[in-house]
């Protein structure tokens, strides 16, 4: 039996600041720099297994040889370790780039595939001690380089059109033992910026959020872990979500500098109620890969070793996670609760040495509700399914210069039955805040001049919440950016003045212009407090890929519905 699994210094001009201000006041239609849609098709393994139309079109597209059941090829390369055979073409639609800087008669891209495949093997098999998908049954693991990134523009004879968006494919081959399969891998031949996914009824978008060799590296790490999953065996009734969590986490373990997974973090943090940790859907596994990344940071290799030992026993995959955590003196319930804390402390809230290693470059959670507390009480309600979470905010207005008291609330619903049934029965909840002490209410903001109390109720009594209190601080107003000048080699954060009447916790847009009044960069940021100043905290170092300035004078504008600020600052960039 065989099934196909698609994975898927500046020369400053003199100008009049009066003219500059006039132009800024009339800047119109500044577009929001929103996150691009995450690619849900990059590794659609378990979602496509039982779709014969997809299987047929992918076999046709990959030019399968019916006698071998594998793609046709022209050239091969054995990796330095001898563990991988790379199959590639140097002409035709599946051709790799022919650049050969080391003159060894092998295209450099193919050399890189061989090198990084060996690196992935060294980490996942040798370092982690996971099962090898090679052996007497498969002396070398086969990797085929094919053009699989772009979607098709025309339907085939059956009316099916491949939407594309595929980074790689892992295809199980022969059943070696009961429920354990050998496999081979197909990855894109160039990971080009020009490849586009073409979703039905939607606009085409770039397939790869990461391109070239960097995309190839993480795809090898991802797909090779699927190969390990196939040879280990698994409970296929609920495994697909966790399978993708595992494979995406190994991208970060093997190549932490790439961060392609951040596309899923952005979408999850912005639209958390669209995804479910216990859905049984491979798509949701991409978005919850941060759960496995958290477990790796907390428990390291032992968690993965224990998990794969349980997986080999063919028990339910969520039970395998829970059992592994029990051996590490934890539980899946405890770690789900921890995840809510980890995902809160990101961006400017991040704490050095705690939570995600990439916390500083992660976005903040987007609030589902943002409410102003009004005496004597405020409440809001909603529905939530098991293993979802939502972020809400209640702010308590204080008079300037004291910033608002802010209560951030992360609400979730834990129900182990959802792991086994994938039946999601929502629970309705109500959050209530009041200024009088009532039965079953808990006091919040212990040092506030005004007493506040909170209570959470739900119909099934299974909803719980994490509360994060941000007490008001005595603030002051300033109108300068600092440090000024900003030294790219020595500093990371630039602070810009927030609009004068805005509050900590509000948002404002920062737009940076060059001295010719041309927009260089724009981003929406939360307003925070630094040395009592209400500021937009801009991590220039983390944004160098989008805004990589030369040394010189720049202009800024910060704005929201409360007003705007404009001014100038300078940058000294010795890295350019």
Image (cartoon, rainbow, N blue to C red):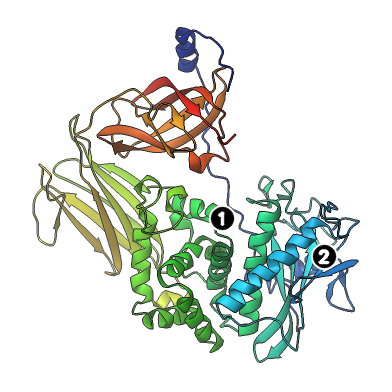
Is residue 274 rendered to the left or right of residue 13? left
Disc 2 marks which residue?
62
Place residue 141 in its image quadrant: bottom right
- Per the rendering, the mark at residue 257 is 1
Q: Tell me if 410 is positioned left or right of 492 in this view.
A: left
Q: Residues within 10 Å of mark 1 (few under 14, many from 20)?
A: few
Q: Residue 266 — which label?
A: none
Name the spot of residue 18 as percent of width and height, x first.
45, 8
Residue at 58 percent of width and 52 percent of height: 38
Quick one: 159 or 525, which is closer to the camera?
525
Q: Is residue 86 above or below residue 33?
A: below
Q: Quadrant of the N terminus?
A: bottom right
Is label 1 in a helix, a strand or a loop? Answer: loop
Mark 2 element type: loop
Residue lying at the far bottom in this picture: please name it: 178
Closer to the camera in the image, 519 or 412: 519
């Amino acid at each position: 039996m065989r099934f196909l699994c698609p994975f898927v210094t500046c020369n400053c001009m003199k100008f009049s600041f009066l003219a500059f201000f006039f132009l800024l006041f009339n800047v119109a239609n500044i577009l929001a720099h929103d996150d691009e849609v995450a690619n849900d098709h990059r590794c659609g393994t378990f979602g496509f297994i039982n779709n014969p139309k997809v299987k047929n079109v992918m076999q046709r597209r990959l030019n399968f040889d019916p006698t071998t059941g594998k793609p046709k090829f022209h050239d091969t390369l054995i990796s330095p370790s001898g563990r991988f055979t790379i199959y590639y073409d140097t002409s035709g639609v599946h051709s790799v780039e022919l650049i050969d800087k080391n003159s060894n008669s092998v295209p450099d891209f193919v050399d890189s595939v061989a090198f990084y495949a060996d690196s992935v093997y060294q980490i996942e098999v040798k370092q982690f001690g996971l099962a090898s998908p090679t052996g007497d049954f498969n002396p070398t693991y086969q990797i085929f380089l094919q053009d699989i990134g772009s979607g098709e523009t025309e339907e085939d004879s059956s009316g099916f059109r491949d939407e594309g968006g595929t980074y790689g494919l892992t295809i199980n081959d022969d059943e070696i033992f009961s429920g354990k399969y050998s496999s081979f891998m197909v990855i894109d031949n160039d990971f080009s910026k020009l490849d586009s996914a073409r979703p039905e009824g939607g606009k085409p978008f770039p397939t790869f959020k990461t391109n070239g060799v960097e995309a190839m590296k993480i795809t090898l790490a991802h797909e090779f872990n699927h190969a390990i999953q196939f040879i280990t065996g698994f409970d296929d009734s609920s495994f697909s979500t966790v399978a993708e969590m595992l494979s995406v986490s190994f991208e970060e373990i093997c190549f932490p500098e790439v961060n392609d997974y951040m596309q899923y973090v952005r979408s999850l943090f912005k639209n958390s109620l669209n995804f479910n940790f216990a859905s049984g859907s491979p798509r949701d596994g991409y978005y919850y890969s941060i759960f496995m990344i958290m477990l790796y940071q907390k428990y390291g290799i032992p968690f993965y070793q224990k998990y794969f030992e349980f997986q080999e026993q063919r028990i339910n995959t969520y039970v395998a996670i829970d059992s592994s955590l029990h051996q590490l003196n934890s539980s899946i319930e405890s770690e789900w609760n921890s995840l809510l804390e980890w995902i809160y402390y990101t961006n400017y809230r991040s704490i050095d040495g705690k939570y995600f290693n990439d916390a500083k470059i992660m976005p903040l959670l987007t609030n589902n509700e943002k409410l102003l507390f009004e005496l004597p009480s405020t409440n809001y309600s909603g529905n939530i399914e098991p293993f979802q979470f939502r972020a809400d905010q209640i702010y308590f207005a204080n008079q300037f210069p004291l910033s608002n008291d802010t209560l951030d609330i992360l609400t979730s619903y834990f129900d182990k039955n959802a792991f086994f049934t994938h039946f999601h029965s929502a629970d309705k909840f109500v959050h209530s805040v009041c200024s009088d002490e009532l039965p079953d209410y808990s006091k919040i903001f212990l040092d506030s001049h005004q007493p506040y109390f909170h209570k959470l109720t739900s119909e099934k009594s299974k909803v719980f919440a994490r509360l994060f209190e941000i007490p008001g601080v005595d603030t002051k107003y300033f109108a300068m950016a600092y440090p000024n000048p900003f030294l790219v080699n020595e500093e990371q954060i630039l602070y810009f003045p927030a609009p004068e009447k805005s509050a900590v916790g509000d948002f404002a847009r920062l737009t940076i212009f060059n001295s010719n009044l041309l927009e260089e960069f724009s981003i929406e940021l939360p307003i925070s407090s630094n040395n009592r100043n209400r500021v937009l905290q801009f991590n220039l170092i983390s944004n160098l890929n989008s805004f990589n300035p030369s040394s010189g004078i720049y202009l800024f504008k910060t704005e929201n519905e409360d007003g705007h600020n404009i001014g100038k600052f300078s940058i000294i960039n010795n890295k350019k």
